[in-house]
Image: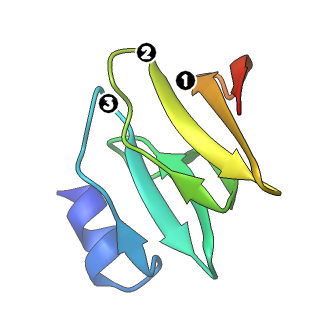
Amino acid sequence: NNVGQFINNELYDDCKSHQNGLIAVKKNEKWGFINNLGSVVIPLEYDEADSFKEEFTMVKKNGIYKIINKKNECVLYCK
């Protein structure tokens, strides 16, 4: 599929499992998310990222953890 081709062609350094239509990918030490077509839907700007569970995932940026939705909107800050 297209996603496998993008990852196999080394556009990304790492990836996590496909969950709920989005795949967490890593490039140059930053994580973001692509869709099934390989298009970036959440910019690669996070230091850490989990796979989406339902509509949300946890990410870390500049030492701050937060929960975001698929529109990259913060819905909760975590300590």
Q: In which quarter of the image is the N terminus?
A: bottom left
What colouring style does the render use?
Answer: rainbow
Q: Which of 39 and 25 is in front in this view?
A: 25
Q: Is mark 2 on a helix, strand or loop?
A: loop
Q: Which mark is residue 70?
A: 1
Q: Give the residue type that dot 1 points to.
A: Lys
Residue 50: x, y in percent? 43, 45
Q: Distance between the residues labelled 2 and 3?
A: 10 Å
Residue drawn at x 32%, y 42% as measured from the top left = 36
Q: Quadrant of the C terminus?
A: top right
Q: Distance between the residues labelled 1 and 2?
A: 6 Å
Q: What element carries label 1?
A: loop
Mark 1 touching mark 2, by CB under 8 A? yes
At label 1, counting other C-alpha atoms closer than 10 Å, the crowd grade (few under 14, some 14-19, many 20 or more) is some
The residue pinned by badge 3 equals 21
Mark 1 touching mark 3, by CB under 8 A? yes
Q: How far apart are marks 1 and 3 (CA)?
A: 9 Å
Q: Residue 55 carries which label?
A: 2
Residue 21: x, y in percent? 32, 30
Q: Residue 9 carries which label?
A: none
